[in-house]
Structure formats: structure tokens, C-alpha cells
Amino acid sequence: MIGAELLKLVTLPSLRWAAGLTWVATALIALAAHHAAPSEDPIRTALRWTQAGFLVVGVLAATQEYEPGGQIRATLLAAPRRPRLMAAKGVTVIAAVAVLAAPTGTLYPLSVALVGAGLGAILRSALAAVAAGLILYLVVCPLMLGRFAGSAPWLPDTELLQAERGAVAAVAWPVAAVVVAALVFHRRNA
Amino acid sequence: MISIDRVSRSRILHEVSFEARPGRVTGFLGPNGAGKTSTVRILLGLDRPSAGTATINNRPYASLPRPLTVVGALLDGSGAHRARSARAHLRWMAASNGLPRARIGEVLEIVGLTEAARKRAGRFSLGMSRRLGLAAALLGDPPVLVLDEPFNGLDPAGIHWMREFLSRCAAEGRTVLLSSHLLDLPVDDVVVINRGRVVAQGTAAEVRGEHESLEAAFLSLTGAASW
Amino acid sequence: MRKLLGLPTAWVGLVLGLIAAPALVFVNTPGLRRALESGQIADLGYENLGIGLLGALILGVVTVSSEYTSTSDDAPDARQMTATLLAMPGRSRLLLAKGTALSLVVAVQGALTASATVLLTQAMLPKYAPPFEPARIAAAVLYWVLLGLLAYAITLIFRNGIITLTVFIVNSSVVSVSYLLTKLTPWAAYLPDIVGAHMFLRSNPGEVHIPPVTAGLVMTAWVAALLALAAKLFARRPA
């Protein structure tokens, strides 16, 4: 089952594009950041933007099932036990993103991608999930941080800015997103 | 062997019961919106009934360890992501149930898609999509086939082929359940559903009864004669 | 011609965008009070308008992407675009109609939110708020419309809303990538989003100062160029 889910991920052109673009963008921005602020870790700085790419990868991995063509029905016919299917999907996304994120040397992209996958599975629309995820990470989080500095330890992206304060939130958010997605998926008619 | 036992779903299905036996083509007939697709989806574990059970060889679909080797199902759409090629789609499906890769070429051959195997599913015509769906259903060489409106989107040659194919499957001893709003079908047994209730069932001859044709019987049973 | 936007999917997006943008601004404004105690912000109120932009962006994307969404599981190629083109075979007129409708909706939305935000800021923080200047509001609205059109053009070029949405939201976040690029070359200040902001912000981050009118012209040129490219591609492509 995990093999089948991996096959699904690697034979999806949009996912390959998203992964490739994320890599290129991370490298380019890291280069620019290195020029602009040599004292900071350029990859972490670059990730502040390219985390969006990992979010998109997570979203696409989940929403591929719901795009026209009705793949979700084929998936459920092949693997009707939903909890096992969810587990297989989770393991596959984690493995794939871990490989993708390896060059950055941090686990933070994994956290973003899983939040994206959770949102994708809940909303079942790539556009809606990408919009929601990006607004959460790039608009709501900075706003919250700016207005209520005390909220930092609870925000999903603090890990990226201050590694020592955000670890718990960086784990809790994806876990929450995935758990909600699993519950919704288990109850929903396909 | 498929058994549907007093399956209900709020407002859509009311205690639907029937069986489909091996070696026979069972036609599950009814007008649009009668509850055919809902029943099929419940049988395949995609939807949940509010009451009743639906089993295949005495087991609910969701408890089958390798379901594709027991049941082949064709629903609307091909089930393939439009950016994936037909072959890539069948490859993951085969992998999910531990089926040999060699089987992919065989089913593509059966449905006549060998030439189009590398084409993206999104570029398929309606008829080709249905063929790809059927290829996926046949991957595990299943003894039970469940087909929802299999004739939709097929051209005359495709319809002819599908009729022959279904009869051949039954002759091989498979259980074939096909839902349709068409009446001119090579069916052995018939279940007629209307507004979520089974209104007649039996062999094709029994259901036809006094009427001059299955069509006349169907129209009088479903009250559609007022058209 | 504007009937096109009566297409249900487009409407859902439009209504969502209309509600989302003012809501974001509204939520954001009261929070500003806290930030004020520490420092002065010359462009108070006007800066908030950057957030409402998301509404314009989403509108621009939805205008196109709803057309390319498949309407049928059985025939994934059956897109609304096909029906739209059958109804309106003149492609350039179709694009014009859509663009006009989009501009009007964004303009109305922008004018309402922008005035509301600035007035709200004045009402709540009379000591700090800058005076109500219709010209600057107009410039801000123009910026929104141009950005909405930019999103529209780019979505049309890629036929994929996700790319546009990602690029634009990422770019309109904390510090924009374009701004980062200005560190590498001053020419980056002429990228459409930065140059556009010069139209209504006075205390702009960045070393280069561009007068508002020039800024407006440069941004308009960007939008016009991308729209022209989009139109050219659209006219050639099979639906």
C-alpha cells in the first residue's frame, strides 16, 4: 500500500514541478539572502518564503485524490480500510517530504508540508487549501507575532524564526491538522 | 455472490434487498435517481448505509484483504488522475493490491487501450475513460463484477463489445451486477428499483410476466408510463 | 457582457473575496493601537491596505481558474471554458469583458475598504492618523485594480491558479522577495509590486524613491505587457 502511494506521488507531474521549483527558489533566495545579510543562516532565511513550496507539495499530495477523474474512488476501492489507508498516506508523505527537505538540513519543511496535506484533505480543493495555508503562514502568523508577541510559542512558524521556542508548535500544528483530516476522512462518504 | 440485505439510507433507500448469483448477469434497473448508484456505492464501502448490510461472498467490502482480487468495480469516471498516464494509473492500483505488473498489459489489451497506454488520462475521450475504468476493474481478475451504468459514453461498437463481454464473464462463472437505466440488455436476472424501493425481482422472464416486453413491464412498474 | 461573472463558481469566489478583504482589514485595525505606542508610523491606515490586496488577488485568480476547472468526472476535458467560448466566440472581447468586470468589482471593493479603513483609523486613533486624502485613496484603489489584473494575466498565462496565488501571497507577506532583490540591484524597485506601492505609501522601505505618478505609469506598463502576452497566448490556444 505504501508502495502504491509512493507511485502515485512520483508519477504526478504537478508535484514534480512544485518540488523542483521549490528547490530552485530556495537556492536562489538563499544566495540573495547571503548577500543581503551574511550573518544569518541563508537557508533558514530562504525558507521563510519557500516554505510556501513545501506547503503546496503537501496540499497537492492530498488533493490529487479529489481532482476531476474521481481518483478517490479508485483509491478506496483498492484500499477500503480507511484508517490503514490514512496511515499509509501519512508515512508516504513524510518519507517523500523528508527526502525533499534533506538539503535544507532542517525538519521544519516537514511540519509545513503536513499542515498542507491536512488542509488539502479537509478542503478537498488545491486552490482553497493553498490559499488557506498561505494566509495562515504568511499573513496571520506574522500579524499575530507583530501584535501579540506572547503568542510566539503557539504559532506554527516560530520554529523557523527562533528554533528554541517553536519546536512544540511546529509539531502540534501538523499533528492537529492530520488528526482532524483523518477524522473527517473517516466519516465522510467518498 | 452479492447480497444486499435491507439496506436503507435516509430518504434515498428503503430496505433494499436482493442477491446477485454467480454465473448470471443481474440487471439492477431503474429510472434516474431511483437509488441505483447509492446502492452500488454502499455495496463497495464508499458510502455508509443508515441500516442493513451489503456483502460480497458473505463479507463486507471493507473487510476484504485484497479487494481487487475479489471484486472489480466500474463507477463513473475512470478513477485516474488526469495528469497520469493510463499505465501509471494501473501501476499504482496493481501495486496497492500486490498484483503482478504483467497484468497491466493484459487488461489494457482486453479493453483495447494498448495504443493509448502512455497518454494522459485527462486527454481521453468519454469512451476511453470508461475503458480505462474497466481495465482497472479487471486488474485482479475478480470473480465478481459490479458495473454502474457501464454503457454510458460508449459508441455502438463499444456497446456491442460490452454486451458480449458481460455475457462471457457470466459464462465463465463470474457474478455480474450491472446497474443501468437501459432495458435492452442481455440480463439473466432483474431487480427493478424505483424511488429507493425494490418493486420487482426475479428472472428476466418472471419480471416481464404478462407484459409484451421488459420495457413495458418496467414502465408499468415504475409508473413512468404517464410520460 | 458582465453576465459572465454570473457564472456560479466565479460568484462564489467574488463574494468570498469581497468579504475576506474587508474582514482582514477590520480585524487588523484595532490591533494597530498597540503597535503605535512604541513607534510612529507615517502611513498608518494606508499600510493596512496591503492586506486587503489579498482579496483583489483571489478575485483575479478565481476569474480565470473557475473557467479551467473541469465540470465532469467522466470527461475531465469538459471545462467551463468550452461553454464560455461557445457562448462568446470572440476571444479578445471575452478577455476584455472579464478584465473589465474584474476591474470594476475590485475597484468598488477597494474603494469601500480603503475609505473605511482610513476613516476607521482616524476615528480610533485621531492623534496619529494621517489626514484623509482622496488622491491617495484613489492611488491605493488603482494599485489594487492593477494587482488584480496582474493576477488575472498571470493565471491566464499559466492556466493554473496555484502558481499565481503562491507567488503573490508569498510576495505580499512580511518582507517581499522583490524587496529582497532590491538589495541585490536597485532596478528591482521597478518590479510591479514595489513600484506600485510607491503610488500611495510615502515612507517606503528601500533606498530608491520613485514619484507616485511615475510609479503608477511603470506598474500600468507591467500590467499592460502581461495582459497583452496573456491575450496573445489565449487567442492561439485551443480551448
Image (cartoon, rainbow, N blue to C red):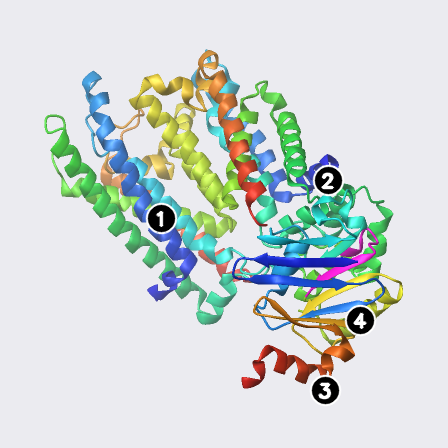
Q: Residue at point 49% right, 50% down?
A: C157
Secondary structure under badge 1? helix
Q: Are marks 1 and 4 on the same chain?
A: no
Name the residue that disc number 2 marks: A4
Name the residue that disc number 3 marks: B210
Name the residue that disc number 4 marks: B161
Report, in whole angstroms, how far the alpha carbon at label 1 lies from the one at label 3.
59 Å
Name the residue that disc number 1 marks: C16
Report, in whole angstroms, how far the alpha carbon at label 2 lies from the one at label 1.
37 Å
User: Is any part of residue C167 visible from this angle?
Assistant: no
Q: Which residue type carries mark 3?
A: Glu
Q: Confirm whether the magenta stretch covers residue B142.
A: yes
The segment highlighted magenta reads: B137-148
Give the label, 2 or 3, closer to the camera.
Answer: 3
Report, in whole angstroms, how far the alpha carbon at label 2 lies from the one at label 3.
53 Å
- The disc, 3 or 4, on the residue closer to the chain's N-terminal end is 4
Q: Label 3 lies in what chain?
A: B
**Labelled pair 3, 4 in contact (Cβ < 8 Å):** no
Q: Which residue type carries mark 4?
A: Trp
Q: Are marks 3 and 4 on the same chain?
A: yes
The quadrant of the rendering that contains the N terminus of chain C is bottom left
Q: Are marks 2 and 1 on the same chain?
A: no
Q: Give the crowd class for mark 2: few <14, some 14-19, many >=20 residues within 10 Å.
A: many
Q: Give the crowd class for mark 4: few <14, some 14-19, many >=20 residues within 10 Å.
A: few
